[in-house]
Image (cartoon, coloured by chain):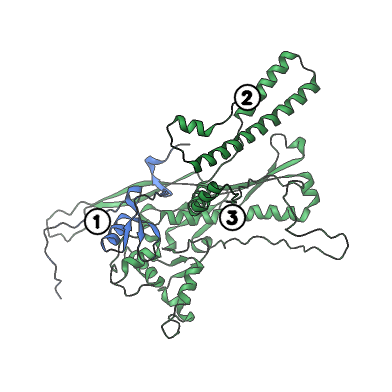
Amino acid sequence: MKKVDLKNSLNQRGAKISADQELFLDSLTEEINSVLEERQSAIGEIVNSRLAEMELSDEIASQVRELSEKIAKNSTPEFRMSDTQKRALMSVLTERKAEIVEAIRTGRDLDLFEIRVAAPHQNNNGTVSLGVGVTYPTVENFDESSVFATIRTPENFIFELILNRQSSNIVKTRIKTEQAPKEGSVAVVSEANAKPLIQYKWVKNAIERKKYAGRIEWTEEFEMDNGALFTAIVKMIQRDVVSALNNGIYNDIITNATAYTSSPQTGKIVLPNLADVATVLQGLINSQNYNADVVAINPTQLVDLLLTKKADGEYLFPKSAISDLWAGMKIVTSSTVSVGYMLVFDSSIYTEEHTGVIVRVGQYNDQFIKNSYTLIAEQFSLLDVAKIDLVASYYGAIATISADIKKP
Amino acid sequence: MAQAKVKSNEVGSVTYISQDSKDDFKVIKLKENGQLYVEHNILADNLIARGLAEEVKKADFDLESKTIRKISDVKDN
């Protein structure tokens, strides 16, 4: 098997390698080659043992061996990264750059992160494990809670804000006919004069549905031996599909939102705070003949505002008066909203249609002979909005909008 | 009461501000807190001109596309 030689390869391409980098490249090369060798020998061993059992002719055995070598050479483990994971990886690498360089220089171990890949639910693959320091008692002086403690997720708030309905079928594409600026206008006309010609114009835009989906797999044994836990897992994947739909709609709303550019309040507000920013955005929306009625912020931001005090310790905003600060807008606090950002919009511009959570159970590939099953859970959704109405939604960084409206 | 109207030779028109292209945005560092933000060019240039922020040319960013599109952009798939 051809071995990897990173140093030589880089040298051939004219790279200048320092002593520290050389140390790193050597260890990386060694690691890659050992992984490749392991995979090669594992596949080779399996093939050779099966060939011995089957007593094939030399010619066929040789062809099978050749094929197995090609598989070992070309097969790569399945590893996909979403854009969010890529950004998270870049963020970790950027944040811990100094530690990484130091670890390479000194040759010490560094735990950056764990890469975990989902697997089927089985009794023997760590789906359920004992916590650190926990041993299962051998005497009967214990009981087990029947309540499964689950990781909390943000509340699904979006369906409380926008008009939505459930439907059995969601179309793939919805065409929206939107008004464009008209030509000509009504005017006062004198006797015997021609009336002005008016032409109303339209443009057709399109919105497409989205599908939020996931699957779980399990063995017969796992379901048989963990009845209650299995039921909880089936409920959880349905809950997670609904959460993904909620988060997806929220993300679409902020992606569609208009970016703040400037306002009549630019450079005019003394010591602007969160409520001032919300009011400025509300003003921008309302001046376009809409009615901004929702402010979404991270809970941290509201706490900052609630705890703002004057020099003598008196609260600047009495808690009872907080709702008045937002000029009639509903305040939504959710950890789904990024810290430091704010969404202000007229909720009437959006409507949403979705299917119920569709759940199906089946088997694919060799699951039947392995007593395994697959459950898919999915939900289709179409978020309806007209492009001309997007001026009624603003999303932006509180700090930059504050800086813009702040009086020098 | 009669309405007063300022006479002007300039014809007023609605200004369309593009927000759909990556070129419409830039990365700035706000001096007040040292944080990086992706902002529309109008706001970014305004803050830079007022000395409240500085442009960060090396930083890259992604701009996600809106969910509603012109008919011509929809692909049949």
* Numbered badge on residue A70: 2
Structural distance between the alpha carbons of marks 1 and 2: 64 Å
Q: Mark 1 vs mark 2: same chain?
A: no
Colour of chain A as rendered: green
Which of the 4 quarters of the picture holds residue B6?
Answer: bottom left
Q: Nearer the viewer, mark 1 or mark 2?
A: 2
**Does the rendering let one see residue A189?**
yes
Structural distance between the alpha carbons of marks 1 and 3: 41 Å
Toward the viewer: A304 or B54? B54
Q: Is residue A387 left or right of residue A39?
A: left
Helix, strand or loop status at disc 2: helix
Amino acid type for the residue under numbered disc 3: Val
Give the chain of mark 3.
A
Q: Residue at x 31, y 68 (%)?
A: A405
Mark 1 vs 2: CB contact within 8 A: no
Amino acid type for the residue under numbered disc 2: Lys
Helix, strand or loop status at disc 3: helix
Colour of chain B as rendered: blue
Q: Which residue is drawn at 49% across and 67% down?
A: A332
